[in-house]
């Protein structure tokens, strides 16, 4: 097992990784920007190294600085967390070249899944149900030809896409022409490549993802699904598991399909397969080759510490259990609490005057925040994750309502009022929502507000 792990991240996930390491008797090295010198994970880590100025590209994305910090402190492994360098295959390769273990899949696997076109091809080969789609589109004519082969509506996506950038829908030939040009231009601006491809556009799907764990010896398990359909502008707001849309048979079926696909792919460490789910069918979209923000809800219902498993797998340990040993109990829901105005979503960094996190049975709060902490303006606005677990979905919902009510955050605005509103809506309570539900709800709210001329 590793003796010392460097945590190449900040915020709550840095603390999450520190906690897993300490429980395994592993020492930790925190790396931080100048703005994060007083962060909780820096205080708790056994050692800390300042790796650069405030901007992410000068610090948390600064590969030579991070690898130097690992070499100087004698760390044997690096955990990248999520965001930043977590899905950067070049970084994983560079880490390994310096004799340090990258806690994650191989650079080769990361590269294959990072390119949406090769990921789709690999998924098809591995037997996953994939949305009907095209190879790389060579021209407008080629795009129109494929749109007619697939059938309208279609969506054009960037091969290196993420967060919805470079994504355009089209409902007829004329729209394909425009969507193709726009998608390429957006992809070129946002990513290094302007290569785009096409898929059948699903109009009212849910976003359901599957968590997997795989060791280096071909042992693979899935840890069930998470329903992440409650989102706005590609930012998840509430996640839950199990999905209210699936029954036990569907869950076991997709679980086994995913498990054998991961076996065939030879993928290792933790990963998440994203699907759209519509009319009882799953459609693979892409795979995330990292730990995800919402991993704690899976931990709640499976009892498995996913970060601990990532570290064990990277160190060469065997999983030590198989699918039949995994049992799920109850229901879990997570709220991502952001320091933002709950109506405009404008980030609200600043000083936390008072902080009281909820507690009690079935309540977990993952956060780096403490009273007197100042949220720097340079990074993501997520400041806490509230995770509740109950025997049934209704019990989890009641517990979430209670925990949100108990939360005291004074000094900055947060998304808590919005989350309280969402969980009191009939559609949410009934589990009847798709990926568009939250944005439609917010639109309705905006339209029902009195306008200046009406007052
Ligand atoms: C889609 C889709 C409908 N049909 N693909 C958005 C981000 C990227 N990861 C994939 N996305 C979508 N791909 C097909 N063929 C709808 C979306 C989509 C979406 C997906 C998951 C969660 C929220 C979403 C919000 C808008 C669009």
Image (spheres, rainbow, N blue to C red):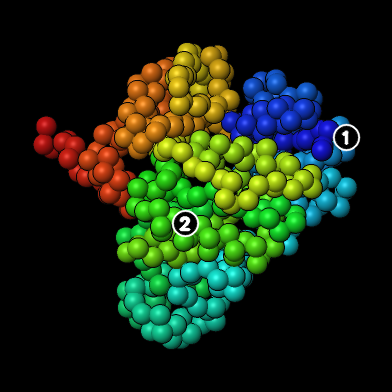
Q: Rounded to the nearest whole Å, what is the CA distance between mark 2 and mark 1?
A: 44 Å
Report the residue at 56% width, 77% height from top. 136
The image quadrant of residue 207 is: bottom left
Q: Is label 2 in a helix, a strand or a loop?
A: helix
Q: Locate the N terminus by quadrant.
A: top right
Q: Is label 1 in a helix, a strand or a loop?
A: loop
Where residue 425 appears, as percent x and y from the top left, is 24, 38
Which residue is tagged 2? Answer: 252
In the figure, 234 relative to 109: above or below?
above
Residue labelled 1 has its Cβ within 8 Å of some atom of ligand 1 = no
Q: Please give the label number shown on residue 74.
A: 1
Q: Which residue lies furthest to the left in this view?
A: 454
Q: Residue furthest front?
A: 324
How many numbered marks, from 0 up?
2
Left or right relative to 308: residue 188: left
Where residue 59 appears, as percent x and y from the top left, is 71, 38
């Amino acid at each position: 097992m590793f003796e010392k792990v460097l945590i190449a991240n900040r915020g709550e996930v840095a603390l999450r990784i520190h906690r897993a390491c300490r429980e395994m008797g592993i020492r930790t090295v925190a790396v931080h920007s100048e703005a994060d010198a007083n962060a909780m994970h820096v205080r708790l880590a056994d050692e800390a190294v300042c790796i650069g100025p405030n901007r992410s590209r000068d610090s948390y994305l600064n590969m030579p600085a991070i690898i130097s910090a690992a070499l100087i402190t004698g760390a044997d492994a690096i955990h990248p967390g999520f965001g930043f360098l977590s899905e950067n295959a070049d970084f994983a390769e560079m880490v390994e070249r310096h004799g340090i273990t990258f806690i994650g899949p191989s650079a080769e696997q990361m590269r294959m899944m990072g390119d949406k076109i090769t990921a789709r091809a690999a998924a098809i080969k591995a037997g996953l149900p994939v949305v009907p789609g095209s190879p790389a589109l060579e021209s407008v004519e080629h795009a129109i030809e494929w749109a007619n082969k697939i059938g309208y509506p279609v969506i054009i996506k960037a091969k290196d896409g993420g967060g919805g950038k470079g994504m355009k829908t089209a409902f007829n030939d004329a729209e394909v022409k425009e969507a193709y040009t726009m998608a390429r231009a957006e992809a070129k601006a946002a990513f290094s490549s302007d290569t785009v491809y096409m898929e059948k556009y699903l109009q009212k799907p849910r976003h359901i993802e599957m968590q997997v764990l795989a060791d280096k010896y071909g042992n693979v398990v899935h840890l069930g699904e998470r329903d992440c359909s409650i989102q706005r502008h590609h930012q998840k707001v509430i996640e839950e598991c199990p999905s209210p849309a699936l029954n036990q048979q569907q869950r076991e079926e997709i679980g086994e399909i995913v498990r054998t696909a991961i076996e065939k792919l030879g993928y290792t460490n933790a990963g998440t397969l994203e699907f759209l789910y519509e009319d009882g069918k799953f459609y693979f979209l892409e795979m995330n080759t990292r730990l995800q923000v919402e991993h704690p809800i899976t931990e709640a219902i499976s009892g498995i510490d996913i970060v601990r498993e990532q570290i064990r797998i990277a160190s060469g340990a065997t999983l030590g259990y198989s699918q039949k040993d995994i049992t799920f109990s109850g229901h879990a829901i997570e709220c991502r609490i952001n320091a933002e105005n709950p109506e405009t979503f404008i980030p609200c960094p600043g000083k936390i005057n008072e902080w009281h996190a909820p507690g009690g049975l079935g309540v977990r709060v993952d956060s780096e925040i403490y009273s007197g902490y100042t949220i720097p303006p340079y990074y993501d606005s997520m400041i806490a994750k509230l995770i509740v677990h109950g025997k049934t979905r209704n019990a989890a919902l009641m517990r979430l309502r209670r925990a949100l009510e108990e939360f005291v955050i004074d000094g900055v605005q947060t998304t808590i009022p919005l989350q309280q509103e969402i969980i009191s809506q009939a559609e949410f309570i009934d589990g009847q929502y798709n990926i568009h539900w939250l944005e439609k709800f917010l639109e309705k709210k905006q339209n029902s507000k009195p306008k200046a001329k009406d007052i």
